[in-house]
Amino acid sequence: MNWIGKKIGLALGGGGVRGLSHIGVLHILEQEGVKINLIVGTSAGSLIGGAYASGQSPREIQTKIDTYLISPEFDDSSLKSIGISFSPAPKTSLQKAQFYLMNRYYLMRAFFRPSLLPAEDFKSLINYLLPDIDIKDTRIPFYAVATDLITGKEVIISKGSLREAVLASSSVPGAIEPVRQGDKLLADGAIISSVPVRAARELGADIVIAVMVGRDLPIAKSDDVDTATEIIYRAGEITSNRLEEVELAGADVVIRPQVGDLHWADFARSGDLVKKGENACRESLDRINASVRKKDAPVPLRKRLSGFLWRLFSAEKKK
């Protein structure tokens, strides 16, 4: 599906490990011949979007991630340990004690350092998945969305190192250290734009396909908001959900893989996320086609050439 004169933009949202479902969406779009003219990614969306924009196929991206998740680098990383601690999978008494001590250590670390996790843990994943190129050299125009913690403004990164752009876009507040870039201090784009629909429009997309991999806002039980900490956390959830709804309202099509309540760092349960992305995209294909038809359809190239030749012939006859 390649429509002359219409730019299709893909806005890939943040969600940590849930972002692996983006791979399934890309696979189906590619399979159906939907030509993407530009990709804008936030957080996990920038990681998968950047890999795809650099020229890797969805299958290649999936293979790389599967290989990384069984590598010694990941096995020894704090990222894996944090994910396991948040996983609802049953744990032995020894594991519970270990995770309790580990979480206390990370809590103390947070008082003295800008992040819970060592920067190298996440950099190793980025370097494993992405080529060391300038963001301007991607095969598909690609942009990473980050948040400047100094000014509070959205930053659309369109030049410089692809790896550094993705690192900045994915720097989850508190978990991963922000990236200094000149006078900016860049952190996770999801702070200000969890699904970068608005950015895709500003960058010239006529049709925006948004992929939302965040968790739906759950209905809270009254005893879930008893303490000050729980109330503050719940308020933050509601605010984020509302901002997300406002942003998604600007998309032509919203694809929502059924990611459930998966924690952003829970890699242990990531196995079927690609399939969930594929299923959600297949269910959205009719909406993608309908959205394109609702736009003012451009005159096909063949008709435009015919019209040009007819005008040229008419002009010659009048001479």
Image (cartoon, helix red, strand yellow):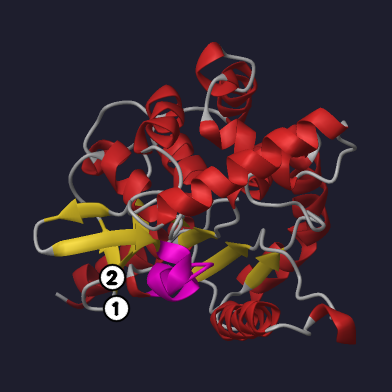
Our reading of the magenta stretch's main secondary structure is helix
* Residue at the left extreme, as displayed: 182
Which of the pair 103/315 is nearer the observer? 103
Horizontal and vertical percent for residue 10? Answer: 51, 58
Q: Secondary structure at mark 2?
A: loop
- Is 200 one of the magenta-colored residues? yes
Image quadrant in which the C terminus is located: bottom left
Q: Amino acid at mark 2?
A: Leu
| Residue at (34, 74) in percent of width and height | 202
Left or right, 285 with reference to 103: right
Which of the pair 206/262 is nearer the observer? 262
How many marks are shown on the rendered structure? Answer: 2
Horizontal and vertical percent for residue 114? Answer: 33, 54
Horizontal and vertical percent for residue 55? Answer: 42, 30
Q: Amino acid at mark 1?
A: Gly
| Residue at (55, 36) in percent of width and height | 79
Q: Quadrant of residue 307?
A: bottom left
Q: Crowding at label 1, few (<14), some or many (≥20) Cα neighbours within 10 Å?
A: few
Which of the pair 87/35 is nearer the observer? 87
Return the residue at label 1.
152
Return the residue at label 2.
149
Write down the region rendered in magenta: 189-201
Q: Is residue 304 above or below residue 252?
A: above
Q: Secondary structure at mark 1?
A: loop
Given contact means CB atoms under 8 Å apart, are the residues at marks 2 and 1 in contact?
yes
| Residue at (34, 26) in percent of width and height | 131
Which of the pair 27/12 is nearer the observer? 12
Is residue 226 at least partly visible in the picture? yes
* Residue at the top extreme, as displayed: 72
